[in-house]
Structures are given as structure tokens and as C-alpha cells.
Amino acid sequence: MNAAVAYKEADGSSKRFTVPIVQELASNDLLPERYIRSEDERSSLLNTSSQIAIPVIDMELLSGENDCRQKEMEKLAMACEEWGFFQVVNHGIPGSLMEQMKRITREFVLLPLQEKVQYAVQEHEGYGQAFVFSEDQQLDWSDLLYLTIMPAEKRKMKFWPAKPVEFRKTVEEYAILVQRLSNQMLYLIAENLSLNAPDRFVHMFGEISQSMHYYPPCPRPDLVIGLSSHTDGGGITILLQEDGVVGLQVRKDGDWIPVQPIPGGLVINIGDMVEVISNGKYKSIEHRAVANKEKDRISIAAFCNPEKEAEIGPACELINESNPLNYRNFKRSEYLESYFLEGKKAIEFAKINPSSAA
């Protein structure tokens, strides 16, 4: 019922321990104490609002040079500034491939435990739970398979399942199209920010990792959190949700907004690195996933990241008297040390004046 987890501490030493596989807990109707959240966290599960929805961007409207494109670009800018989240349609990834990705994820999840644990997490990659650093840490009600998918030479194939047989081929096909969509979106975001080099983000965020999440049904979803509240630590994230089951929630103005899946759509959100480079103009927003009593759920997130030693800081062309410097420059590796410990809003360490930027 457990999987091994291995990671390196800040001093370079290694540590190894085991954590439960949530799917096995759910099948045995078990809810250990480590998954039960504090009263404050549980009360926040009730603080939701379905009266509004995140913006929807039509990628086809962004491909021309007309008034429709300008209006859609303005809508994209609003989504990045006010929400940090939006859904995209007509994005160029075939629906059949998206369905295939969900199918192979589910088929992997349904494999016997002894076949899956051979891919157990080591230093943040593999199967189990990510960001677990101690034997008594509070845990999320979900399992995941975390992989590096781009560039191809950085893949650790020992974590890529051999079953189902279509797994590696499908992930490869999806990775190519996700990278293409990522480049398109990063170029559009840079254009909206009026950066001197509109391809700056494309060159910076060339590393893509993928997290394939499985959220089993929970006997008491009011006591647990599927994925703890956090912001994403890269440039942008591209999320494929399963239709028919709402689990993702975005925090806005103190409320948690459920994100209803759109058939054929993808969710995109701004990460901490774009917030910093935009000097706080574009927002990296807290989000989480909740559990469901009756239904399981799959989601597949692609994280577009800079390399570990990249230098991150606000774009100089966005600094002026009316918009003073809000963040200091830092190395991505420095940020990661904070992110792995903090999880949400790790960029607080880089703020020059914490009250001056969201």
C-alpha cells in the first residue's frame, strides 16, 4: 500500500521513506490522520463561489491581424492581470489526442500496485506524491506520475511506464504539441507586455515537465484536500482536465472559484516566473484541487519552466516611476529552495516591498 520516496536535502544528503498510495487507501475505505486537515483549511472548502468563471480565450481569433485579434488580446491581458487563469479553445491539440492522454493515464492508474511502484518518486520525479520531505508531513488526497518531457535529452526514461503499451508514444506526441502551444502563448503574453524581445519567454521557458494526477473518491471529502493550495513555480502551466468532474479551484478576492471543464478546452495559468518578469503586472494565483465522494478524477499538467541556473528578474522596460521595481533578481535554483519548502507564494523572498506586489 506504500511507495518509496527519495529526495536530496539542501546539504546534498539523501533520504528515503515511504508514503501511502492514496488509490489503495480509497479502495480499502481508509482515511488516515495524516490526510485530515485543520479546521481552518476545512472551513475554506465551504468558501466557494460558482457565480463567476475564469475567462475563455479563442486561439483562432489570435491568429489574424484584425479587430477581433485586438479584442482577444485585450481579453488575454485582462485574464493575466486580474485572474492569472484562463481557458483556451481552438488551440490546435486534437481532441482525440487529449482523450488518448486521459485514457493512458487511467490505464496506468489501474495497473497492479507492484507494477506502478517500480517508478516510485526519486528527487521529485516518478510515481507517488511530490514535495514530501518527512515521515509525519500532512498529505494530499491524490497520487501522481511526474515526468520531464522536454527537452527530450533530459528525460529520465526509467520513470516512463512501459504499460500501457501506447504510453510513451502518446506522451511524446502530446509533448510536441504542448510545446508548440506553450511557445504560441508565451509569445502572445510577451507581446501584450510590450517586451523588447517578444520571443524572450519562448527562449527562457524551454523545459517542460508533466504531472499526471489521479484523485480517488474520498469517503469524507470535507476533511481532505486533493492538492494543497499553491502557486506554480514556472512560466505558464497548461492543464488538461477530465470532463464532467470539477476539482480545480482558483482563489480570487478571498473566494475559491471552481473551474468547470470545457470539452476540448485547456486551462492555462501564469506561474511565479512570469509574475516576477512582469514586475507583478501579471499574477500567479493560488489554486488547489478538492476531492469528490462519488467520482475519481484525472488531470494532466504541463509546466513550462526555465533552466535551474537561469537568472530571473523584472524586465527593465517595465520599470518606471509609476511602476517601481517590485522584485530583486535571483537564480531559479535559489527560488526552488524556497518553493520546495513553502509551496505557495514562494516568490515572497524576492519581493523588495511585500506590500507593493501581489
Image (tube, rainbow, N blue to C red):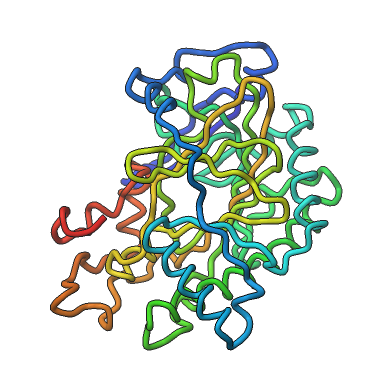
Position of residue 339 measured from the top left corner of the image (x, y, whole percent): 35, 48
Position of residue 273 measured from the top left corner of the image (x, y, whole percent): 38, 63
Residue at 72%, 55% in the rendered image: 264
Residue at 31%, 66% in the rendered image: 281
Answer left or right for 149 relative to 38: right
Answer left or right for 204 relative to 107: left
Relative to 19, residue 307 above or below: below
Number of callouts: 0
**Is residue 39 shown to the viewer in this render?**
yes
Residue at 45%, 13% in the rendered image: 33
Position of residue 133 measured from the top left corner of the image (x, y, whole percent): 41, 34
Q: Who is closer to the viewer here, 320 or 343?
A: 320
Relative to 70, residue 351 above or below: above
Q: Who is closer to the viewer here, 192 or 41?
A: 192
Q: Who is closer to the viewer here, 184 or 232?
A: 184
Which quadrant is the N terminus positioned in? top right
Answer left or right for 19 relative to 84: right
**Is residue 176 shown to the viewer in this render?**
no
Q: Who is closer to the viewer here, 233 or 61?
A: 61
Answer left or right for 77 relative to 171: left
In the displayed image of the protein, which residue is found farthest to the right? 165
Where residue 244 sits, quadrant-wise, is top right
